[in-house]
Image (cartoon, helix red, strand yellow):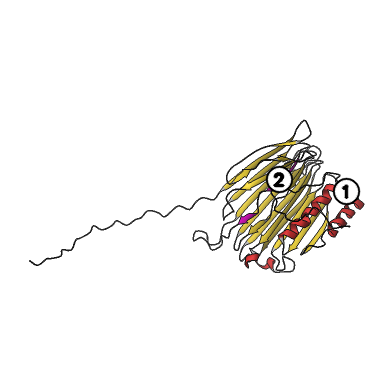
Amino acid sequence: MARRDAAIALPSQPKDDRPGPTPQPPWHGQARLRFELSANGTTRFLGRASSPLKVQRGFLRADGRCELPLLHTAGGLVGGDRLTVDVSLAAGSRALITSVAAQKVYGSIGRSRRAPQGDWAVQELDFELAAGADLEWLPQELVLYADGLYEQRAQVTLAPGASWLGAEVVRLGRSAAGEDLGAGRWRSLLEIRRLGESGLPKGSDGPQLGWDGGAWILVDRIELGQQSLLGEHGMAGQPVFGSLVWAAPAPLPADGLAALLELCRQDRRGLEGEMACGALEPGLVARYRGPSTTAARSWFTRIWYRIRAARGLADPELPRVWPFQEEPLSPPAN
């Protein structure tokens, strides 16, 4: 008997109109840190953080300063991520804040159909220092990958007699892998203002300085990307930029400031790249442009050493989390 193969009609499959996977929302990590002076003259801290930021264990240095490392647990920033760090120092307290590792910012331009122009990763920093407080903000370097977008906004408010030292080093593209920044951009805004003796903000009808008896010390806005990476008045093709700013607690004598700047210039010896420094009222500003994050960090560390010495403070100790293999705290012989 002949066998007849029957065609079996399969039911039609309904069209799947469900949306695809929902993109993960960007992270907004936050850290709030407060430093206070203990009865024994040492500084203690109170703090909390939300992912991906994590506050590590603080260390007391021999001079009573609190050293505190911050950890970014996500391994890097992507477009749309945001970090907010609020730091306050009570009167007379002293702190050093650093980061556990270099920060990475991944490329975002052309990586998403939703936002082909890319999304900015943003870090917002707010520092408030009471009278006589002393903060050193010395994170490790930032590496901005090709087509990455990163912006940092930092506000520093200083009461009379407070000192703030801050530095940043950024590598524009993974140059060791033959990569440049591409269409990426890096922005930095630093605003430093000194309160008057009353410590009270002026109203909207007050003087343009904005603070009772106080003044702006520095408003520093920088953007690097595209043409500014190549131009002589920008990076001139170099991949590493660095900036260090010290807002001194009080004006330095003219001869003392001149001597300090001369020592800082001498400390450039043996380091590759272009380095310049000048006076800030009161304090100093130093800039680096060159091929080496190690050279930038070494020079800034030597300047840190010089500033401590000019203030009559204990010599700095390298934070335990820094990866230095050399001894940058030994400036060249004068």
Q: Residue 114 at what x, y percent from top left? A: 49, 59
Nearest the eye: 48 or 199 = 48
The quadrant the N terminus occupies is: bottom left
Outermost residue on the top side: it is: 39
Please tell me which of labels 2 and 1 falls first in the chain.
Answer: 2
Nearest the eye: 53 or 206 = 53
Q: Residue 78 at what x, y percent from top left? A: 57, 55
Q: Which residue is mark 2?
A: 97
The quadrant the C terminus occupies is: bottom right
Task: Indicate which disc residue 252 carries.
Answer: 1
Nearest the eye: 22 or 322 = 322
Q: Residue 282 at what x, y percent from top left? A: 83, 49
Taking 105 as reference, is 39 left or right?
right
Outermost residue on the left side: it is: 1
Q: Is residue 208 visible?
A: no
**In the displayed structure, would residue 226 be above or below residue 243?**
below
**In the displayed structure, would residue 66 be above or below residue 103?**
above
Residue type at numbered disc 1: Leu
User: Circle 2 sits in a helix, a strand or a loop, which is it?
Assistant: strand
- Boundaries of the magenta span: 93-105
Q: Residue 57 at what x, y percent from top left? A: 66, 41
Q: Residue at x 22, y 59 (%)?
A: 10
Nearest the eye: 56 or 257 = 56
Taking 298 as reference, is 76 left or right?
left
User: Circle 1 sits in a helix, a strand or a loop, which is it?
Assistant: loop
Q: Is residue 66 visible?
A: yes
**In the displayed structure, would residue 26 be above or below residue 227?**
above
Assess disc 2: are there few (<14), some (14-19) or many (≥20) residues with their C-alpha within 10 Å of its C-alpha. some
Q: Residue at x 68, y 62 (%)?
A: 224
Q: Is residue 104 magenta?
A: yes
